[in-house]
Image (cartoon, helix red, strand yellow):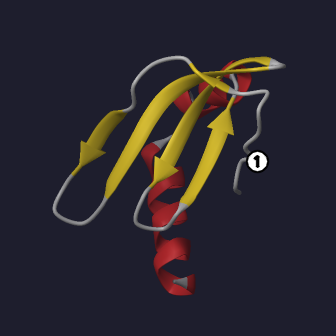
Amino acid sequence: MNASSGADVAAHSEPIVIANEFVDVEVRPVLTRNGIRLEIRSPRRGTSVRLDAMVLDALTVQPPEVFSDLLRSESASG
């Protein structure tokens, strides 16, 4: 899921880089016409997504298995 970019989005702060030996991502809040979103960007893939507070809140209640399944499906397709 790629986020569209445009003149309506202003960077809210400098990105924070989170990385390990396999991957690095940048996260930062951005201000959009619809409020603040958290932008997560993968420089290596050239993809990004912007998530609102409701989606982020939903992530906090997911069991770890949800993310393990997501990673398994990603490695199978990529």
Quadrant in the picture for residue 43:
bottom left
Question: Dot 1 lies on which element?
Answer: loop
**Residue at the image point whose x is 38% and y is 49% from the top:** 25
State the residue lying farthest toward the right.
Answer: 34
Q: Is residue 55 above or below residue 74?
A: above
Q: Position of residue 21 (x, y in %)?
A: 16, 63
Q: Is residue 55 above or below residue 47?
A: above
Q: Is residue 59 above or below residue 77?
A: above
**Residue at the image point whose x is 44% and y is 35% from the top:** 27
Q: Is residue 7 above or below residue 40?
A: above
State the residue lying farthest toward the front.
Answer: 7
**Residue at the image point whose x is 47% and y is 73% from the top:** 72
Quadrant in the picture for residue 29:
top right
Q: Position of residue 20 (x, y in %)?
A: 19, 54
Is residue 37 left or right of 15 when viewed as pictured?
Answer: right
Q: Position of residue 12 (x, y in %)?
A: 54, 17
Is residue 22 left or right of 33 when viewed as pictured?
Answer: left
User: In the rendered image, which quarter contains the N terminus?
Assistant: bottom right
Residue 58 in view here: yes
- Front residue of this view, candidates 66 and 9: 9
Neighbourhood count class around disc 1 (C-alpha, 10 Å): few under 14, some 14–19, many 20 upward: few
Q: How many numbered marks appear?
A: 1
Residue 62 in view here: no
Q: Position of residue 46 (x, y in %)?
A: 52, 63
Location of mark 1 (residue): 4
- Front residue of this view, candidates 50 and 12: 12
Amino acid type of the residue that numbered disc 1 sits on in the rendered structure = Ser
**Residue at the image point whose x is 54% and y is 52% from the top:** 66
